[in-house]
């Protein structure tokens, strides 16, 4: 077990001085990952879990001084270099889940709310993650600087990813010229939500598409698709229009490889009440792909359900009070790695919470989740 995990983390520098190393770093990392996979949420939980299974872990780990204390776990994770930790994390994910080449990469941010440290005057950490649904994996994540926002973090995250032939989706905050340029330079395409954060761009796109839709696109080349979904008493009709008749827009707004714009209407009927929302998008994809763009926009929000919702509901991330040093950031990576491991294991047809319990009860299943 330790060898398999250490294959990807051996390059991670140990931040401790030699005289303070009572416990091996590989033991601490292995116990932490196994604890999180099996349902632990705090350092105390991890210690209790490891002590209950000390005989089992003793078959794989050296544990020269037994199970470390919860303070030891906290101090080590607070001191670990988060960038080097992220590099090791990506090494494991690439080995586990394959490449993101040619896939849909959804970028979205999430705040770990209880990591707010008022006494230390530190904001809650905010992490931007790259979720690839087809691989059921987080391919990278970057922490947003306390005095910045996602705009500065997204380019760093893009540099870590294989964007070749992939399509990147980002909410409106990522609709930036530099971000679009970086995606294109990486060999990928983009579908970016357009709102009011780009000067007159949103107004120009909105006015043109609203007018074209009202006139049924007379004289404007376009593509159209319509999709209807029913479930849980709700009926949702989504209509998508795309056009590449945008030479006028390129002259006003110089965006890398901008080839089309799109409007999507989402009409929802629930308990006899109907509401309609219209959203606008900028893309490097050709216009004759209304159905594809509709699917891409729909799939983007899987990052909320398949990643962020799972982290909060199944792993209790929002309730985590880990705050000191880099501990909150590094522990968030362990949770994402644990979630990826659990999603990759498909033999048990049960939810993530049940898989965590099963791994804690069944040593053979835990080894299977870890890929051992």
Image: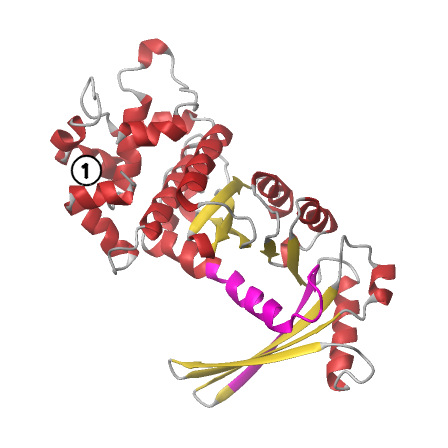
Q: How is the image coloured?
A: secondary structure
In magenta stretch: residue 294: yes
Residue 280, placed above or below residue 169: below
The residue sitting at 43% across, 41% down in the picture is 93
Q: In what quadrant of the picture does the C terminus appear?
A: top left
Task: List x then y, in percent, for residue 19.
Answer: 32, 9
Q: In what quadrant of the picture does the N terminus appear?
A: top left
In magenta stretch: residue 256: no
Q: In this view of the protein, can residue 46 be seen by the observer?
A: yes
Q: In this view of the protein, can residue 72 be seen by the observer?
A: no
Where disc 1 sits, the SS reads: helix
Residue 279, placed above or below residue 59: below
Of 78 and 37, nearer the camera is 37
**Side of 249 where 262 appears, left or right:** left
Graded by Cα atoms within 10 Å as few (under 14), some (14 to 19) or many (20 or more), the crowding at tag 1 reads: many
Of 247 and 280, nearer the camera is 247
Task: List x then y, in percent, for residue 230.
Answer: 43, 82
Of 184 and 20, nearer the camera is 184
Dot 1 corresponds to which residue? 49
Task: List x then y, in percent, for residue 184.
Answer: 70, 49
Q: In this picture, which residue range is highlighted in magenta?
A: 274-302
Farthest residue to the bottom: give it. Answer: 272
The residue sitting at 79% across, 74% down in the picture is 208
Farthest residue to the top: give it. Answer: 19
Q: How many marks?
A: 1
Residue 40, placed above or below residue 76: below
């Amino acid at each position: 077990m330790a060898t398999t995990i250490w294959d990807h983390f051996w390059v991670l520098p140990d931040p401790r001085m030699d005289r303070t190393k009572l416990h091996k770093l590989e033991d601490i990392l292995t116990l932490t990952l196994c604890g999180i996979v099996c349902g632990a949420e705090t350092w105390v939980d991890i210690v209790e879990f490891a002590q209950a299974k000390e005989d089992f872990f003793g078959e794989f780990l050296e544990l020269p001084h037994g199970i470390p204390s919860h303070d030891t776990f906290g101090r080590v994770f607070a001191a670990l270099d988060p960038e080097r930790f992220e590099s090791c994390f990506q090494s494991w994910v690439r080995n586990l889940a394959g490449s993101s080449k040619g896939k849909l990469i959804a970028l979205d941010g999430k705040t770990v709310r209880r990591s707010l440290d008022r006494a230390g005057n530190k904001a809650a950490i905010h992490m931007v993650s790259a979720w690839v649904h087809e691989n059921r994996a987080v391919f990278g994540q970057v922490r947003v600087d306390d005095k910045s926002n996602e705009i500065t973090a997204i380019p760093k995250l893009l540099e870590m990813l294989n964007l070749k032939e992939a399509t990147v989706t980002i909410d409106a905050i990522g609709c930036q010229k530099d971000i679009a340029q970086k995606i294109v330079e990486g060999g990928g395409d983009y579908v970016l939500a357009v709102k009011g954060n780009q000067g007159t761009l949103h107004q120009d796109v909105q006015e043109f598409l609203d007018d074209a839709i009202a006139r049924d696109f007379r004289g404007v080349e376009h593509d159209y698709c319509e999709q209807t979904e029913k479930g849980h008493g709700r009926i949702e009709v989504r209509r998508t229009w795309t056009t590449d008749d945008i030479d006028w827009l390129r002259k006003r707004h110089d965006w890398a490889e901008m080839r089309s714009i799109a409007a999507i209407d989402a009409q929802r009927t629930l308990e006899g009440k109907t509401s309609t929302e219209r959203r606008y998008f900028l893309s490097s994809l050709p216009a004759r792909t209304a159905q594809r763009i509709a699917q891409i926009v729909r799939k983007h929000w899987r990052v909320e359900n398949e990643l962020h919702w799972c982290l909060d509901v199944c792993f209790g991330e929002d309730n985590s009070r880990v705050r000191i040093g880099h501990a909150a950031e590094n522990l968030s990576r362990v949770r994402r790695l644990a979630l990826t491991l659990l999603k990759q294991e498909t033999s048990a047809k049960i939810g993530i919470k049940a898989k965590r319990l099963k791994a804690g009860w069944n040593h053979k299943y835990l080894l299977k989740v870890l890929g051992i």
